[in-house]
Image: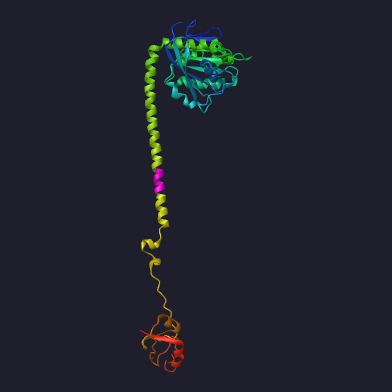
Amino acid sequence: MVGMYTISRLLLTKGGCLGGGDKELKGSLPKEATLAVLGLDGAGKSTVFAALRGEPVIGVLPTIGQASDTVPFGQKTEISLFDLGGAEKIRGIWPKYFAETHGFLFVVDACDRQRFSEAKATLETVLAHKYMAGKPFTVLANKSDVPGAAGPEEIELALGLESEEVEKRGHGQFRVESCTATKGTKKKTDSRILRGIRQLLYQIDIERGTLAPRRTADMTEHQKELDVARAAKNARVQKIREERERKAAAAEAAQAGENESPTETGSGPACAKAPVAEPLATGCVEEGTTESVVIPAAASAATGAEVAVPHSDPTSRARDGSDIPTLRSQSRTRAKRNQVVPI
């Protein structure tokens, strides 16, 4: 039986490298398994995913975010697949699916040697995660049909999967398999892809005694982490909302104070009544003289008031200092022009 965390050596087989023994694994397949399909963008993950789903494999668009499906494998096994986008900005979502997986496929573009170091760093990050450490996986060296493509042995060395490194890090069991994802779908799917997945499923079944309870515990712990993160996020959102409402209320109060009129508050000089100027009628005498008010004849006629000719103090003086003509000396003129209404 193959050990869970150590690999004694890598055996070069038909187009692939088998870790942990001198021959391919034989055994039974689990009834169900959950696998993540990982790798850099452009490696061919979505094409492998399409081939396993029985869909056309030519012109497959890259996955933005994630895609999932459950597909049959053989007659008694169902595989739940998570195809996770490989762009650098999208890789941050990968850990959300790690706890749920039993193992994973790591797809590498065997023609793009310039990105082997990036693929290595990405794989090491996955293997170092607490929910993935020690889990079995298969490396698919895709595009092997292209002339000059790296073989499985070169891929394993480029990814740092030589036996000494694996034993140091405690990686789970793995296999490196060359393949061509665009070869076909359904019955025409590259047999090396199917072989790599079958070996992975055999290893999952061998380790089911430890993988099953570990997966359950990991999912429970991950859900708690999600709940804590969600509560923290809700608290931040609530705090931002309350601060926004406080600022809005303060701004509204300030605006109301600016728009408030002084008349409404009952204070300020605008509330004081301005003195009403009383125009002095023509011919009006000083206070203290005979009380009479001279009004135009036209106004007297309009009111129908009785006309009276008052007597005035001949020593009275007008406001401008000039003598006021007596009404007697001007009685005839006044009779023609004015009428006086007694007060």
Image quadrant in which you'd find residue 99: top left
Image quadrant in which you'd find residue 205: top left
- The image position of residue 108, as x and y in percent, is 55, 18
Q: Would residue 238 be visible to someone looking at this image?
A: yes
Pick the front one: 337 or 323: 337
Q: For the point 39% across and 62% down, which residue is it? A: 262
Question: How many numbered marks, from 0 up?
Answer: 0
Residue positioned most to the bottom? 329
Pick the front one: 148 or 167: 148
**Viewed as shown, does residue 185 lie left or right of 252?**
right
User: Which stretch is magenta?
Assistant: 243-249
Residue 76 position (above or below residue 124): above
- The image position of residue 64, as x and y in percent, is 52, 26
**How is the rendered protein coloured?**
rainbow
Q: For the point 53% across and 10% down, which residue is it? A: 17
Residue 284 position (above or below residue 221): below
**Viewed as shown, does residue 110 lie left or right of 316?**
right
Pick the front one: 157 or 252: 252
User: Which quadrant of the rendered structure holds the N terminus?
Assistant: top left
- The image position of residue 165, as x and y in percent, is 49, 15
Image quadrant in which you'd find residue 155: top right
Residue 332 position (above or below residue 106): below
- The image position of residue 195, as x and y in percent, is 51, 10
Q: Is residue 316 magenta?
A: no
State whether the magenta stretch is mostly helix, strand or loop: helix
Q: Would residue 330 be visible to someone looking at this image?
A: no
Q: For the point 36% across and 61% down, which residue is it? A: 265
**Viewed as shown, does residue 275 lie left or right of 17?**
left
Residue positioned most to the right? 147
User: Which quadrant of the rendered structure holds the C terminus?
Assistant: bottom left
